[in-house]
Amino acid sequence: MLQYQKVTEQNAFILRNYYKNCTYQLCEYTLGTKLMWEEELHPEWCESDGCLIVRNEFQGQKVYDFPVAGENGDIDAALLSIEKDAFESEIPLCISIVPECESVRLLKRYPYVHVYNIRTWDDYLYHSQDLATFTGKKYSGQRNHINKFTKVCPDACFRELDIEDLPAIDRFWKDYEKEFSKEEIEKAADELRYSKRMMNMVGRRWFRCGGMFDKDRLIALALGEQCGNTMTVHIEKALYSYDGIYPAFVKAFAEHFGKDVEYINREDDAADKGLRTSKMQYHPAFLAQKYVFKPINDLFEHVHTFPTLTSERLVLDQITEADIPAYNKLVLDQERNKWWGYDDVGSLKEPFTERSFYDVVWRDWQSRNCINFAIRLDNVFIGEAVLYNFDFRGGAELGVRIDKAYAGHAYGTEAFRTVAEWALYTVHMRNVAAKCFHENEASYKMLSSCMNKAGSDDAYDYFRKEV
């Protein structure tokens, strides 16, 4: 399981080392977004496979950013780490937000996936030169507003903000709140509070802060962050009482900070009609789309009712309440289950009861996390076959255990072959994997007869069957 840390000012430089060269062009892949919205997103991070992995919260669910590669980062290996982390954390796999440039990679990776692309989330990206000059007929409205502002405030000037400007920034927020109704302020209270906190970071090397002054009075401010060829503007506020201040300030900020970038990202419109109209009036070069990928496993797609499988001697079907005594006996046989590789008792999250293991099996089937087959010989429960650990890429693991009273008759091999062929040819999976401890000679012999060996490590021998 990945080991995460909360995003803080103290470890922010590590994230910034990844984001500074990131080419995704989305505001989510910036340090500023993680710090500004940490109360909403609760971002946590770790490094794996030469990549930055960030896990956030959205609508009460854990979701993953797409990995950001370092100099020698392996994106595919990092995605595998994310998939394993979601499985081990027992959370649905959701990768959000995915940049358009990486969407094809995930479409190829996941055979079955729900993909969302919501217009409200689109970031507005502008050519920095367009905002710095406002040349051309399409910007005539902005130029007219700037002329009005310049006529009223001919001596207004733009300059970078630093820590010495904190008193002026504090006065700006007081002036800013006076210009809005209480209702408007309350509506945007959180965003305003986050903006104030972020502006206290003025002077940090990660951010670019600028302000427009009318003599000694700060009348507009902004905080941006350069990532690759894009400057993302996290905060952009101005006093509306100064007619034309916004286009004048947008132009001044782009002139000053846009020289080394090709694009300026002014982020999304939060589904605000007025804000959307305003952002469109500045004529974006394009809207940067964001994709949410929710992979689903093969059971969800193909198995809607519990199947009954048959072989020469066996019937494999759903474990029922009538099987509870026999199933508990199987699960609690510690001598045989030392080769199972999974602690059934230790995995329980609640005190053990007679129904505990059955309830886990039922919940896993309902959620399609795995499918547990009862193995029956002449209507007698003699074991279990479990297809589990779906990797969302067409693969899963298969395990079989047989009651010791029925061992030695190749029932395990027969059940294993039956479920494997069902998975490959009926559920249309790409591969089925299995493993056994080195010391488990019986399982090694059984798996060797059914599958191809795929490797080994200090504890296990691994096998694989694919079509």
Image (cartoon, rainbow, N blue to C red):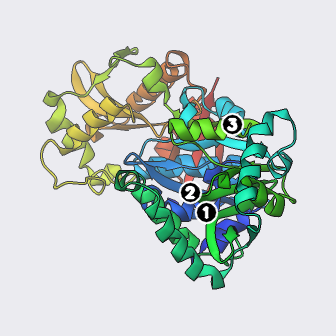
Of labels 1 and 3, the one closer to you: 3
List x then y, in percent, for residue 116. Answer: 54, 30
Left or right, 263 with respect to 427, comes to right
Residue drawn at x 52%, y 33% is 295
Q: In terms of secondary structure, where does tag 3 sit?
A: helix
Task: Give, as a three-letter code, the residue at label 3.
Answer: Gln
Residue drawn at x 68%, y 58% is 49
Q: Are marks 3 and 2 in contact (CB under 8 Å)?
A: no
Q: Which picture quadrant has residue 35?
A: bottom right
Mark 3 surroundings: few (<14), some (14-19) or many (≥20) residues within 10 A: few
Report the front residue among 198 and 107. Answer: 198
Q: In terms of secondary structure, where does tag 1 sit?
A: helix
Res 144 seen here: yes
Give the mark nearest the N terminus, 3 or 2. Answer: 2
Mark 1 surroundings: few (<14), some (14-19) or many (≥20) residues within 10 A: many
Q: In terms of secondary structure, where does tag 2 sit?
A: loop
Q: Is residue 173 above or below residue 370?
A: below
Task: Give, as a three-letter code, the residue at label 1.
Answer: Gly
Report the front residue among 164 and 293. Answer: 164
List x then y, in percent, for residue 133. Answer: 85, 49
Left or right, 333 with respect to 258, comes to left
Give the mark nearest the N terminus, 1 or 2. Answer: 1
Residue corresponding to mark 3? 281
Res 5 seen here: no
Q: How far apart are marks 1 and 2 (CA)?
A: 28 Å
Residue 32 is tagged as 1
Q: Is residue 63 above or below residue 294?
A: below
Mark 2 surroundings: few (<14), some (14-19) or many (≥20) residues within 10 A: few
Task: Give, as a three-letter code, the residue at label 2.
Answer: Ser
Residue corresponding to mark 2? 241
Q: Which picture quadrant has residue 370?
A: top left
